[in-house]
Each structure stands twice: as C-alpha cells, then as structure tokens.
Image (cartoon, helix red, strand yellow):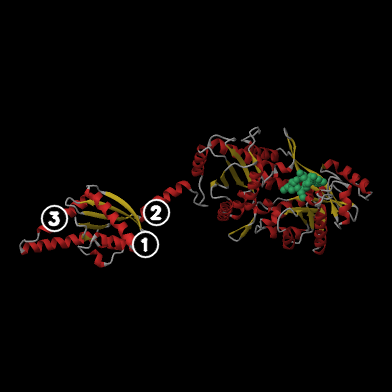
Amino acid sequence: MPEKSLALEMDRGWKAFQIVNGISDSEKKHVKQLNGLFEIALNNMARGLSMFDDKQRLVVCNNLYGEIFGLPQELTKPGTPFADIIAYHVWTETGHNTAEDRAHQRRWIDGHVGALSAGRSFSETKYLKNGRTILVTNQPLPDGGWVDIQEDITEKSRAEKKITWLARHDTLTELHNRFHFREELQTTLANGRDFSVLWIDLDNFKAVNDTLGHPVGDALLKSVAKRLRKAIRQTDVLARLGGDEFAIIRIGAATAAQSEQVARRLLRAITADHMVLGNKITITASMGIALAPEHGATPDELLKNADLALYSAKSTERGTYAFFDPTGDYDIGKSQRLEADLKIALKKKQFELHYQPILDIKTKSVGSFEALIRWRHPERGLVPPVDFIGFAEETGLIIEIGAWALVRACRDAAGWPDPIKVTVNLSSIQFEKGDLYKSVATALELSSLAPERLELEVTESVLLRDHPNTHDILHRLRELGVKIALDDFGTAYASLSYLRSFPFDKLKIDRSFVRDFGTPQGSDCMAIVQSVTGLAKRLRMTTVVEGIETADQFNLISNAGCEEVQGFYFSKPVPVGEIDDVLLRCQDLFELKLVKTA
Ligand code: C2E
Ligand code: MG
Ligand code: MG
C-alpha cells in the first residue's frame, strides 16, 4: 500500500478507535475483533510503522518498528513519548546521551514536528550502526499526529552503490576504469592545471595468459595494480584502461628529469618479481608520457599522444618510457603492418643468419659461430633483431622464426670444418609455446649435424619466467648431446642462483661488463668477470666474454681467466658466404692454427 493511503487508513482506524468508547457490548466485541485484525495486518507489513498523536506520544506501532530500531518492549507501548524513543535511539547509536545531546534532540524533534504540522510529508534516510539503511517516510495526520513508515533499503542502496561503483571501476583490479579516467582528464584540463598522462602497457603479457592461463594472467594484473597503487600519490588518478594497459594522471608541473624519475620508479615497481598463484613472474612494462596542456587540449588528444609515445617506447626497447614528441613522425598502423610484414618475411624467406665467431683462447681456434638473425626487408634494408624479435615474441611468430633459424643454422654449420660449432639463440617463448625439442631434433636430422656441434643460447629471462616445461626441455636437449649456454649473464636479477638451477655448459658474460673497462667502474667490472669466471670453473662451465672491441680489452680479459671471447675486435657478424674470410682473419690476428674450410 502506498504510504499516503496507508496513513489515511490508519487515521480512519484511529478515529474509529476513539469513537468506540461509550458504545454497546456487541459493538465493542465487533470493534475488538476489528482491532485484532488490524494488529495482524500491522505486524504482517513488510515495513515498520509507528503512529504518534498530536501530543507526540506513540499511539500504535508494529513489531518491525521495534525491531528496526532495537527498541525495548516498554518503548513500544501506546503512550510512550516520541522524545523517549528518540533519546533511546540516539543512545544506542552513539553510546551517549548527555544534556547537550538531549538539547540537540529537543531541537531536532521541534523541527521534525514543525515540518509535519505544516502539513508536509517528507522522507529521511537513516544509516544505522548495524549497517542497515532505513528510509523513514513521515506523513502528517489531519488532527496533528503523524505516521512514520520505515523501509529497510539496505540491499537496494547497496545495489545502487554497486551499480555506481561498477560504472567507474574495473572489477578485476578495483582501479578506476577508462570512463572515469577520461572524465578526470576532462575535469583536470578544465581546472587549467599542469599534469602528465602516463600510459603503461605490460610487455609480453599475452604470453603469460597463453602459457600460464588466464587465472595467472588476472592475478598478475591485480599484482601490478597493487604495486602501481602503492607507487602513486594520493592526488594522482590511476586507472586500468583495459587488457594490460594502465594509465595515471599525475597532477602538477614537472621538469623532464622529474618525470623521468617517476617513469623509472613506476617501471621498476612493475618489474620486480611477482609471486602469483605459485608462479614467480617477471614482467617488464613500457610507458608513454604526454604532458598537459602542451601535448593536448582535450582528453582524447592527450590519450592519443600518450599512446603514440607508448608505441614509440615499445618499438625502441621493451621496458622503457618515451615522451610524446610533437615533431615526431608517428605511424599508428605500424604495429599491424609489422605483424603482416613478418608473416610475409617468413613466407618469402627474407630472414638471414649472420655469423659471428666465438674464439677459444687456449686452443687458439674459432670454437663456434653464433647465428644472429637479420631481416632483409625490401624497403628498409637489413633490419637488426632488436627491431623485430620482441614483436615476434609478443605475437608468437617467434616460434616459426626460431624453428627456421635452427634448421638454417644447422644446415650452414654442416658445411663447416668439424669441430666448429654453431650457436643459436632461443627465445623464452619457444620454451613455453610450440615444441622446441622437436624443432631442435628436426633441424639436426635435416642437416645431419652432430648434436655436439649445436649450441643453444638462452637468456636469464627463460629461467626467470620459470615455466614448468623449461627445465624438462633443457634436460632433454642436453641428453640429446646439444650444449646449452646462458647468454647475457649479469643483465637480469638473481643471476647466481640460476647457475645452480641448471648445469649450463657455458656462461656468456654480458658485454656491458667489458664496455666499462678503462673507466672508473672498470675495476669493479674486472673483479666481477674474474669472480664469475672462477665460479663458473668450479661449476664446470666455460666462460665467454662478449663485446670485445679492442686489443686492450682482449688483453685484460685474457688475464681474467676466461676461456672464450667474442666481439667486433675479431669480427662483426657476417653472412655465411664470408665465413672463410673470417676464419683467415682470425688466424692472422692471433696467428692461430685454424682449419680452413674446403
Ligand atoms: P646476443 O645473443 O647477446 O648477441 C650479441 C649481440 O651483440 C649481437 O647483436 C652482436 O652483433 C652484438 N655484438 C657482438 N659483438 C659486439 C661488440 O663487440 N660490440 C657491440 N657493441 N656489439 C657486439 P645483434 O645481432 O643485433 O643481436 C641482438 C640480440 O638479438 C642478440 O643478442 C639475441 O638476443 C637476439 N637474437 C639474434 N638472433 C636471434 C635469433 O635467431 N633468435 C632469437 N630468439 N634472438 C636472436
Ligand atoms: Mg646470443
Ligand atoms: Mg649476449
């Protein structure tokens, strides 16, 4: 029954109740019966109801009224002053009822009754201590009293709040969503404040989803969200724009150096290992930064420019950031085109392997050639791996490219003098998708190359990603007779612990250690190279030092106890047709006894 008609019914009932005094016994019996029915009706209502007379005393109430406000029985009896009920209610809700409280209640009651006596009905929402939300509708009665209807709207208001929340949040990470972010951008722009928009995208997130499953992917997104939330300031706005994309509005003017510092800090926060559902995951992220107001006058323009900057960060190097450059030559469709181009490259055989020698210091001979892929692009010329390997990994095309490289390298090496080996680089994705073992076995079979002459290089990221298949594949490859080397050693994190996780045959110390030789940091680098070499020896691993560019560097390295060396000083990577020349050059250079190819 709507509140208004219900109140009128009650009023009529009350009047009838007043008239019954002074009527016959049979009429009294009838009225008593009516009262009984009235009580049943009252107590079966889904709402609480209370009626007060013009003296502000309770006339009647149902059980639900008492229950909603937790009133003791004596306060639900007819005649109870409204003020006593209110005082009790305030006391249960606040835990106190001082003289000051009572004065406040008196003023509140006067206001309440005053509004009703003006003939106005009104509603108010009460939030009770027990978490319930009650909508109280007050309806004045013609003779000066009033009726209160109490409706428990807890669930309804929770649902409304949830809907409002959902409209502005991402349910997975509980961060703000794109809608809210855009609106915040609009408001911040309208306020005329300086700010920056940071657009963050996780690198290779698809691989996590594909290989470890969506629950792990989701948990990783939550973990990233938590890190970002911790890394921002209260005034910043953080949102998940969708998929593996996050964005931040960072309020306030900042110098380029300050922004760079923030970008680095945020990227570092994401990069630290994530323990999710029993998996240790390392992921990097890239970031595009647009500055307001100079890089955009509307939210869309700012978002578009931050996205372009992100795209440029991704295409240079994963795990870095880039600022939007208003003079930059951005090509939005580039990423889709790159994928299509890579597919064409596979079909049209546009990939080539170039070979760089790895020299054995003790035997004074070329121990192996490392195969380094290049893409002979019809327009762009020779494209280096750094420009497409990351993208090939993200799209999964690396599986096919990697399988091709294995076959090509083994076939080329089969024509070289025994025992010169060939070294092939593997991507972590090859361990997680496709059938790497089969690709290697097929390449050996097709080329008839002895497994001992094939060496595979994996980077620390293969171990960092800790995929369940990784160790099994590595062991099976070793059993096949293939050698396994750990590439770029020292560029990732817990390097030394990985040395114990798999018995590598070889350790390639990253070229960054050699680069600093001769500088103030050089002595540290030398100490690191020496101790890593010593450690590797104890673990029966050979050490190779990459990136030797000068005779001085070579002399220093030779004295550090390393067994093998590689670098431009000996030779740059060359096409397969130039292998003989390289062998001769290396011979001249060191007066090495090299076996010439037939
Ligand atoms: P990497 O395996 O560490 O290869 C060594 C890189 O250092 C090569 O770059 C090589 O040209 C360069 N390098 C060698 N000596 C010197 C030197 O003295 N100074 C300097 N500055 N650089 C030197 P490149 O060919 O551009 O390859 C880059 C990376 O791309 C490789 O690093 C490897 O991780 C990846 N890559 C190359 N080919 C393949 C492939 O077939 N499959 C996969 N998955 N990755 C590949
Ligand atoms: Mg390598
Ligand atoms: Mg390397």
Residue 589 in view (yes/no): yes
User: Closer to the observer: label 3 or label 1?
Assistant: 1
Question: Which residue is the site of mark 3?
Answer: 15
User: Tag 1: residue type?
Assistant: Thr
Q: Quadrant of residue 70?
A: bottom left
Q: What residue is rendered at 29% in x and 60% in y?
A: 86
**Mark 2 burial class by Cα count in 10 Å: few <14, some 14-19, many 20+:** few
Marker disc for residue 496? none
Residue 372 in view (yes/no): no
Between 496 and 522, the one lying in front of the other is 522
Distance from disc 1 to disc 2, alpha carbons, whole Å, reads 23 Å
Please state if 475 lies on the left or on the right of 231 as rendered. right
Image position, residue 556 (x, y; %): 87, 53
Please state if 168 lies on the left or on the right of 411 as rendered. left
Question: Which residue is the site of mark 2?
Answer: 158
Distance from disc 3 to disc 1, alpha carbons, whole Å, reads 37 Å
